[in-house]
Amino acid sequence: MPWPAIAELAESVRTGKVSAMSLVEQSLKAAGDHQEYNALLRINEQAKERAQQIDEMIKEGKNPGELAGVPFIAKDNFLTKNTETTAASKILAGYSPPINATAIDKLEAAGAIMVGKANLDAFAHGSSTENSDFGPTLNPVDRSRVPGGSSGGSAAAVALEIAPFALGTDTGGSIRLPASFCGVVGYKPTYGLVSRYGVVAMASSTDVIGPLTKSVEDAAVVLDILAGKDDKDATTIDVADKSFLDDEYDIKGKTFGLIKEHMGEGLSPEVRSVIESSVEKIKASGGIIKEVSLPTLDLALAAYYVIMPAEVSSNLSRYDGIRYGLSSEQAKSIDEVYDLSRSAGFNSEVKRRIIIGTYVLSSGYYEAHYKKAQSVRTKIVQDFERVFSSVDFLIGPTAPSPAFELGANTSDPLQMYLIDIMTVGVNLAGVPAISIPAGKSGELPVGLQIIAPQKADKKLLSVAAKINQKVSA
């Protein structure tokens, strides 16, 4: 059964029309009915207890918050107190954190109830959720295909109506890509708008937290709760406005830059057709379409796959078999503890990224690779700033193709990395972006990506809500 809008759902709980317990039970039943998709790694055993607390607060006349009783799913790289967090890697199997991530604390303080933890590519390293140590998640539209990654479990859970919203992380497209493949909305905020505290780090300079939902309006409601400065995360920024949605903001008169580099070689004809149709609908609604070029986007993927593995290598050095996580019992020396624990605990994709990252940071290669990639990143930031001086938003496809078949790219890492070609530039520039369902290729969903300047999240969500109404009509 489809979930109502999040704001409507919470109001129904606050006014006593429905109970928080009934919503949690509905969510848990949906999770049980869809186990074959492997969208969730585990259920939160404390969800019903939390629902009971919310219902008791309402009986006592207390306000449980803006998201009263609304169930949600957290990607399994969010620390959740007394609930196992593995980041889909066996090196963290059995790890029960002593704290919550800030995002979890904020949602629970607003009355939302976490009902489960979603599958992902281990440590968020992947674009298909096939790199999970606990098996791949299946696409909710076609079980022979991938849901995208790394937030594939989160996107699938929302598409399968297991919960009204899910949390994801986006380092190079990991919210937007699965949103496109699963036919849901995926929002990647401005870098620093949402605290990363308590989220297992992948690449700290591009990691961003955001919601996956069935509508843009729902994404804005969740972002209202998540956004804001956090003393535990020095990269967070202040929020000027409480609401991230302006109903008066319109498509008419706004200039949309159609990204030339994203509409060229490598784009499937089916995706091109859907995006061109969306462009026509934006024009019919009074939007001004202008083709723009960001030449450095052709270098974004190469720069990203130097910078990201370097940060991965650094962030994963703490998994040493001593402090926490898997520890080899066969080790007879400190060196063997490191070697055997990491060899057994990390899968091949994680190891690949550690090796690449260590290489580009090593003596003699730092200048040639890492420093040069950072210089390219600066050029990409400048390219975005230049183009946003002449347009309000950028538009284009989220991915070059619809969801591909399970196993199609697992033996070809380069081909898998190319799936991120239209999303990584956004992360390197730190700007906000959203993927909304724009149409279908056969039965497979296709996402439209809309990008805005830094800190223009309210404008982006407001215009995306209007565009979503037009392209889905």
Image (cartoon, rainbow, N blue to C red):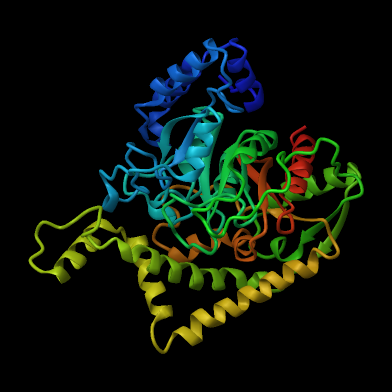
The vertical placement of 119 against 332, above or below, is above
For residue 113, side relative to residue 394 (left or right): left
Give percent across and percent down for residue 298.
65, 71
- Quadrant including the N terminus: top right
User: Which residue is found at the position 49% from the left and 53% from the top?
Assistant: 232
Can the viewer see residue 145?
no
For residue 452, side relative to residue 183 (left or right): right
Give percent across and percent down for residue 55.
49, 15
Q: How many marks?
A: 0
The vertical placement of 436 against 353, above or below, is above
The vertical placement of 67 against 411, above or below, is above
User: Which residue is found at the position 22% from the left and 58% from the top?
Assistant: 344
User: Which residue is found at the position 84% from the left and 60% from the top?
Assistant: 391
Which quarter of the figure has residue 45?
Answer: top left
Can the viewer see residue 168?
yes
- Quadrant including the C terminus: top right
For residue 436, side relative to residue 123 (left or right): right
Give percent across and percent down for residue 160.
51, 30
User: Which residue is at the front of the view, 459 or 257?
Assistant: 459
Give percent across and percent down for residue 340.
18, 63
User: Which residue is at the front of the view, 168 or 300?
Assistant: 168
User: Which residue is at the front of the view, 197 or 304?
Assistant: 197
